[in-house]
Amino acid sequence: MANLLEQIQKQQKNGTLFYAEQSMSVNDLVEKALKIRQRHPQLRGKKVALTDRHLVDFLVSLIAFDGFCSAMYLCASNVTIPLVDGLQVWPLNGQDVSNSQMLPLVSNTRWYLATSGTTGEPKWFAHTLISLTAETKHSARLQKLCWALMYQACRFAGLQVVLQALLSGADLVDATGGEPLSQLALMQKNKVTAVSATPSLWRQLLMTKQLPDLALSHITLGGEIVDQTLLDQLARLFPQAKVRHIYASTEAGVGFVVSDGKAGFPLSWLHNSELPLALKISSEHHLLVKPNKQAKVPSNITTDELGFMDTQDKVQVVADRVVFLGRATGAINVGGNKVYPEKVEQVLLTIADVSQARVYAKNNPLMGQLVVADIVLFDNSELAKLDIASMRRQVTHMCKNQLQRFEIPTKITVVEHMAHNVNGKLNRQ
């Protein structure tokens, strides 16, 4: 397979990157990448760490080093550069051409991505351009798209957007910074037609009431559980758009894509050999996955005797659907009963006035933990005149109809906003 630079050069039409009130053609990015190869032949065949810097510099580095270096470690600003023998940190602080002997070009550069590290020291997992672009599509219609980048480019979800734009010839708008209103203003200015974001980020955009001003034809969700309420909202606002939710992870890469407008995935997929991943459910009701024959589970991931890895995602079969309940590692222990915050949040989000919800544990001397929740309303201007008691009764009534008693929040707090981490996910710390 051709490296990233060669694949971009084969495009009949290359897109434009829009960033910080400026723009640059992808062809110019390629020219900059070629100059890096010429000026730094000593990096050929070596390992490099790419620090999270300006997006232009980061993209140029990706283009320059795929197929040129043996490995690239993509380091976000909050990730410590790993201690790897022979690792060169890019940029090289002014160092230029070396007279050292050049190694051969690399046919399959390893792209190392770090997990978020929210539950401990980040772990590194290797991918290749082939595995990272397993779901990348190419067509004349896709060349006309303009993608908004809502994630850090060095993270798995961000790379998916970047590579889709670069390899399809589409335009790309850097919308990673700022508040939702400024992000939407930037998208409107550059006529964005495709957005990939977490459900939490989509809810923030919906709260601005300006999302319908975009002419979106491609909508992608991932990184968190996608609930039916949000899918229905986006489908109503953009009836002509293609709405997809993607199950993926830094460890395993892209798993599968659901595009039928329903939360979860079809039960029949547990026996579908055509998917990128083989799927099954464990005795603990965890989703287990195994890559197809063309891919391998990374060596630092534990698997069962058949090669399946435990995603730690708790699932439930409902009729002909497999739905996600939450992370097994994030359960709240209420008197010995496990409560999955994401499951409770999905119920809260079905309430018409609730835009965002966060469910978490509160320590209790008798029960061990209790379930409590914060909610954000669609219209914060209503907060001052809100009948809190009435809202709580409405929430409790909804929960009683859909949850077991120990799952019902014992306290509901109405807040003005929710905190999110660098990956666009709800901050549960």
Image (cartoon, rainbow, N blue to C red):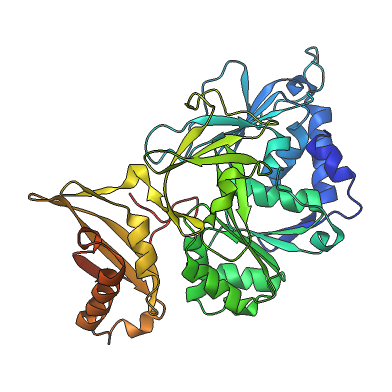
Residue drawn at 71 percent across, 43 percent down: 134
Q: Where is residue 289 in the image (x, y as percent from the top left)?
A: 54, 38
Give left or right: position of 202 versus 16: left
Query: Where's the N terminus, which quadrant?
Result: top right
Q: Is residue 385 left or right of residue 26?
A: left
The answer to whether residue 77 is visible is: no
Residue 212 percent coordinates (x, y): 61, 79
Q: In this view, does 365 lie to the left or right of 116?
A: left
Q: In this view, does 272 lie to the left or right of 5?
A: left
Residue 410 in which image quadrant: bottom left
Q: Where is residue 199 in the image (x, y as percent from the top left)?
A: 50, 61
Q: Which of these two is toward me, 141 or 208?
A: 141
**Quadrant of res 379:** bottom left
Residue 127 showing in the rendered view: yes
Instruction: Tell which of 93 and 32 is nearer to you.
Output: 32
Measuring 39% from the left and 51% from the top, which residue is drawn there?
326
Please determine whether, in this image, residue 209 is positioned above or below residue 72.
below
Q: Is residue 346 above or below residue 4?
A: below
Q: Name the residue furthest top.
A: 101
